[in-house]
Image (spheres, rainbow, N blue to C red):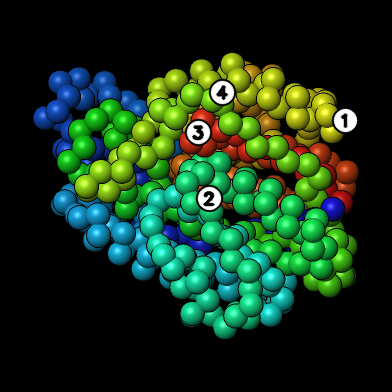
């Protein structure tokens, strides 16, 4: 079965503490909400200490056109994406010629030609690398990218696939939007970049690897009908406006467990067999809903909470930061992990891993 060889991250240059973000939001939103003090509690109660952005906080105090924001997205996405690709390859002395396919995940900006094409003009990849850009899966995108790479490597066992996830959520910020959704988004979302290398069974890259690697052995995608208004973007003249329902934690509690149990039981796995929960941390309430829905104690979500606390919600990228935590600490041979992420649609992406 295809294996995840490595996950690397690239941290954007500007660190902003949650206290600084709360003060910014207070200045911006205070005239629109009489109860701004109560609403600002989301900054204190969200279990986020800091986040990283490509622009400093002063940049967000002014209006910017859709074009300005998207130009910044392309510039920084290509720059950070190129860096994380080089880091991913150097980790195991891979060359650009070793890569057969690039799956690029993003939902926070628009680029045609797509981001990996622009990166390929900076890095001397083979011109025959297969390019699979995936746009619009939001927070579920990172898990989906791993799943699609798994399926590709099943079909082509000698292949090495890059899953490149780039989200610059801050650049979607709408200065003139005084909605509660925008306020919540301001307290939660951040920028991040990550790259995973997935190898097929017959890949020469795996020769000589002796430590256990997460091996993907099953995946499932699920769409909840008639839930288009739960999460996503509204596209308006000024760009992308966040759609973020307050009902997401309730949906997780009511919908996730039967979805997960149906998936893992078909594959001969029970909830008590799951040793590692590789969950996209949508927010504190979502993590608590995971715990409640799946009957897990806090220790099972500690890696997700750590990433949320240090980096915030980086949309599709976040689950790769969480997976890197598990790979850095090392897991025992035979351990079973469940990867899960929720996104627009409303949808879920699930994958089962065994360290082998």
Farthest residue to the front: give it.
Answer: 226
Classed neighbour count for the residue bearing mark 3: other residues with Cα under 10 Å, few (<14), some (14–19), many (≥20): many
- The residue that disc 2 covers is 317
The label nearer to you, 1 versus 3, is: 3
The residue positioned 75% from the left and 24% from the top of the image is 261
Give the secondary structure at mark 3: loop
Q: CA distance from mark 1 to mark 3?
A: 28 Å
Position of residue 329 relative to residue 31, above or below, is below
The label nearer to you, 2 versus 1, is: 1
Residue 123 visible in the snapshot: yes
Residue 252: which disc? 4
Residue 345: which disc? 3
Position of residue 318 relative to residue 117, above or below, is above
Disc nearer the start of the sequence (2/1): 1
Residue 204: name its quadrant.
bottom right
Instruction: Pick the residue in front: 48 or 30.
Output: 30
The label nearer to you, 3 versus 2, is: 3
Q: Please give left or right for residue 259 compared with residue 233 in the image.
A: right
Where's residue 102, x and y in %?
Answer: 61, 65
Farthest residue to the left: give it.
Answer: 31
Classed neighbour count for the residue bearing mark 1: other residues with Cα under 10 Å, few (<14), some (14–19), many (≥20): few
Q: Please give left or right for residue 339 compared with residue 119 in the image.
A: right
């Amino acid at each position: 079965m295809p294996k995840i060889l490595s996950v690397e991250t690239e941290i954007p240059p500007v660190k902003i503490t949650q206290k600084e973000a709360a003060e910014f939001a207070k200045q911006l939103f205070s005239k629109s909400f009489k109860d701004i003090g109560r609403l600002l509690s989301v900054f204190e109660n969200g279990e986020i200490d800091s986040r990283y952005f490509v622009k400093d906080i002063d940049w967000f105090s002014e209006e910017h056109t859709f074009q300005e924001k998207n130009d910044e997205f392309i510039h920084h996405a290509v720059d950070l994406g190129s860096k994380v690709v080089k880091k991913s390859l150097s980790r195991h002395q891979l060359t650009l010629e070793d890569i057969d396919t690039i799956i690029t995940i993003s939902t926070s900006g628009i680029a045609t030609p797509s981001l990996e094409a622009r990166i390929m003009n900076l890095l001397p990849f083979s011109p025959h690398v297969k390019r699979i850009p995936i746009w619009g899966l939001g927070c579920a995108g990172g898990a989906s990218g791993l799943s699609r790479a798994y399926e590709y490597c099943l079909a082509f066992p000698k292949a090495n696939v890059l899953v490149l996830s780039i989200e610059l959520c801050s650049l979607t910020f709408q200065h003139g939007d005084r909605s509660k959704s925008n306020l919540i988004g301001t307290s939660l979302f951040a920028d991040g970049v990550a790259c995973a290398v997935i190898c097929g069974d017959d890949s020469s890259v795996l020769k000589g690897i002796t430590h256990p690697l997460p091996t993907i052995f099953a995946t499932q995608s699920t769409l909840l009908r008639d839930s288009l208004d739960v999460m996503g973007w509204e596209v308006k003249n000024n760009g992308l406006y966040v759609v973020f329902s307050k009902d997401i934690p309730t949906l997780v509690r009511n919908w996730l467990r039967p979805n997960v149990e149906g998936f893992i039981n078909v594959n001969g796995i029970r909830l008590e067999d799951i040793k590692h929960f590789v969950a996209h941390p949508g927010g504190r309430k979502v993590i608590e809903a995971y715990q409640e829905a799946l009957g897990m104690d806090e220790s099972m979500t500690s890696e997700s909470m750590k990433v949320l606390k240090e980096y915030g919600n980086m949309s599709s990228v976040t689950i790769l930061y969480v997976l890197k935590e598990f790979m850095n600490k090392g897991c025992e041979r035979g351990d079973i992990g469940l990867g899960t992420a929720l996104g627009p649609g409303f949808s879920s992406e699930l994958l089962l891993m065994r360290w082998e």
